[in-house]
Amino acid sequence: MSNETKQKFDGYANQYDEWFMVNDKLFTSELKLFQKVLGDISGKRLLSVGCGSGLFESYIDCSGIEGIEPSEDMGKIAEKRGVNIIKYGVIEDVELPENTYDIIYFNGSSSYMEDLAPVYEKSLKALKENGKLILLDVPKESAFGFMYLLGKSLNTYDHEYLRGAMPALPYPLALASSGVWHTTEEKINILKNLGIQKFSYYQTLVKNPLYTNEEVEEVVEGYQSGGYVAIIAEK
Ligand SMILES: C[S@@+](CC[C@H](N)C(=O)[O-])C[C@H]1O[C@@H](n2cnc3c(N)ncnc32)[C@H](O)[C@@H]1O
């Protein structure tokens, strides 16, 4: 594992969780999407790729959830929350057993990976027939995506271009800057090229970032408006 990948989230575990705790309505909106797309997981075997601190998993029964996480800072918290970490490392370096999982999901982690095709291919092989690969991310083309890319290119959110337009506590700049923001269609096309034909899409955070934490949003179908979007791909 490269040090760079490890460092992306090492040292940010508390800041990451605190950001969601302060942005509690944004978090609840994302959690609703997460729960909606996972569906009923009882009796199922799941793998969370880049499970982080297991924050989302701590709101559901995670007894059947395995995790892969490169940052020890984050993963240790996930373990305390009940996620079974099978590997401290990057998904690129992990050998997964074939036809094993009912659901493999990437909750925000594709946004820290350069080359998605080999990683999704590996995940699809590890799914049982009719298993689901679920990808949840901030789309590059969303208002959040633009905000993170602008922050990254200016190296600050505290800039006249952004004055009056920023939420009170934006996502930590270092984490926005280390992101590799992908569009939703980029990911869909990768999956289509890997032979996937059955898709569904759900989204949340359709309000502009300035207002996102004012009230909890309901999940809506589709992927063209949300600041947090889920792709469900069926094997
Ligand atoms: C935005 S955080 C999401 C964490 C968690 N899934 C959540 O929703 O709270 C992205 C996570 O992906 C992990 N990550 C980054 N690159 C990765 C890779 N190549 N393989 C596996 N995980 C990775 C990071 O360490 C980080 O914990």
Image (cartoon, rainbow, N blue to C red):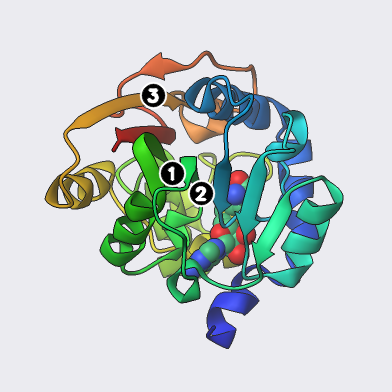
For disc 1, the neighbor class at 10 Å (few under 14, some 14 to 19, many from 20) is: many
Q: Residue at x 52, y 28 (%)?
A: 38
- Amino acid type shown at disc 3: Tyr
Q: Is residue 157 visible?
A: no
Q: Residue at x 72, y 29 (%)?
A: 60
> Within the image, what quadrant is residue 98 found in?
bottom left
Looking at the rendered structure, which numbered label has been put on residue 138? 1
Asked whether 30 or 89 is in front, the reply is: 89
Judged from the image, the secondary structure of the residue bearing numbered disc 3 is strand
Provide residue 185's location: percent of width, then percent of height: 21, 43
Asked whether 41 or 9 is in front, the reply is: 41
First in sequence, mark 3 or 2: give its number. 2
Left or right, residue 5 beside residue 57: left
For the residue with label 2, is its CB less than 8 Å from the closest atom of ligand 1?
A: yes
Disc 3/disc 2 C-alpha distance (Å): 15 Å
Disc 1/disc 2 C-alpha distance (Å): 7 Å
Q: Which residue is mark 3?
A: 202
Looking at the rendered structure, which numbered label has been put on residue 108? 2
Image quadrant containing the C terminus: top left
Judged from the image, the secondary structure of the residue bearing numbered disc 1 is loop
Image vertical order of residue 135 relative to residue 33, above or below: below
